[in-house]
């Protein structure tokens, strides 16, 4: 069974309600990339009349996390996932509609294959870039994910 955009947005409502209330929405999810949008509004603003960095972080993390969830589900294996580190860089005020994109699906395939073959945990660095409606980069993130086969219970 495949993970869909509709399922992931429903997941946001029940498991990450703060992201949903801030207007974060998954738009596209396939084997190679994920796209998430969020629009600057009163609920997600900072005192400088732009989008709060934590909202950008949630949107960027969703691009990488949705991809990890999808790939794990499709593997058919019991694999745990955890963000172990992240870094964000901000280059412009985030106003209007911001679109975050992660195109690192191929890197994730390699890490999951290694963890399934070896049984050892793997870490992978997935990137997400946020651009405004003019196509100008407003922020860029790197999320380090750890993936590991879950141990079998006796």
Image (tube, rainbow, N blue to C red):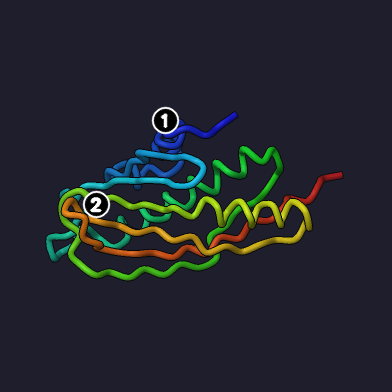
Query: What quarter of the picture does the C terminus occupy?
Result: top right
At horizontal 69% and vertical 52% (from top left) the residue drawn is: 113
Q: Tell me if residue 78 comes above or below residue 83 in the rendering.
A: above
**Is 39 on the left-hand or right-hand side of 83?**
left
Q: Which mark is residue 98?
A: 2
At horizontal 41% and vertical 70% (from top left) the residue drawn is: 87
In this view of the protein, which residue sits in the foreground, 148 or 55?
Answer: 148
In this view of the protein, which residue sits in the foreground, 75 or 152?
Answer: 75
Residue 130 percent coordinates (x, y): 30, 57
Residue 81 percent coordinates (x, y): 60, 53
**Is 10 on the left-hand or right-hand side of 69?**
left
Q: Which residue is mark 1?
A: 6
At horizontal 70% and vertical 61% (from top left) the residue drawn is: 121
**Is 112 on the left-hand or right-hand side of 23?**
right
Q: What kind of element bears circle 1?
A: helix
Residue 15 percent coordinates (x, y): 46, 41
Quadrant in the picture for residue 45: bottom left
Q: Tell me if residue 77 comes above or below residue 94 in the rendering.
A: above
Q: What kind of element bears circle 2?
A: strand
How far apart are the alpha carbons under marks 2 and 1? 20 Å
Quadrant in the picture for residue 8: top left
């Amino acid at each position: 069974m495949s993970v869909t955009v509709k399922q992931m947005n429903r997941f946001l409502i029940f498991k990450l309600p703060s992201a949903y209330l801030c207007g974060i929405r998954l738009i596209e999810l396939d084997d190679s990339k994920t796209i998430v949008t969020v629009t600057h509004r009163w609920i997600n603003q900072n005192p400088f009349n732009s989008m709060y960095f934590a909202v950008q972080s949630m949107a960027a993390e969703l691009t990488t996390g949705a991809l990890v969830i999808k790939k794990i589900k499709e593997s058919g294996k019991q694999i745990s996932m955890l963000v172990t580190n992240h870094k964000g860089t901000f280059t412009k005020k985030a106003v209007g509609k911001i679109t975050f994109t992660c195109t690192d699906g191929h890197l994730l395939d390699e890490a999951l294959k290694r963890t399934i073959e070896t049984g050892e945990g793997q870490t992978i660095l997935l990137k997400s870039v946020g651009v405004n409606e003019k196509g100008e980069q407003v922020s860029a993130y790197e999320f380090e994910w750890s993936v590991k086969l879950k141990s079998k219970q006796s």
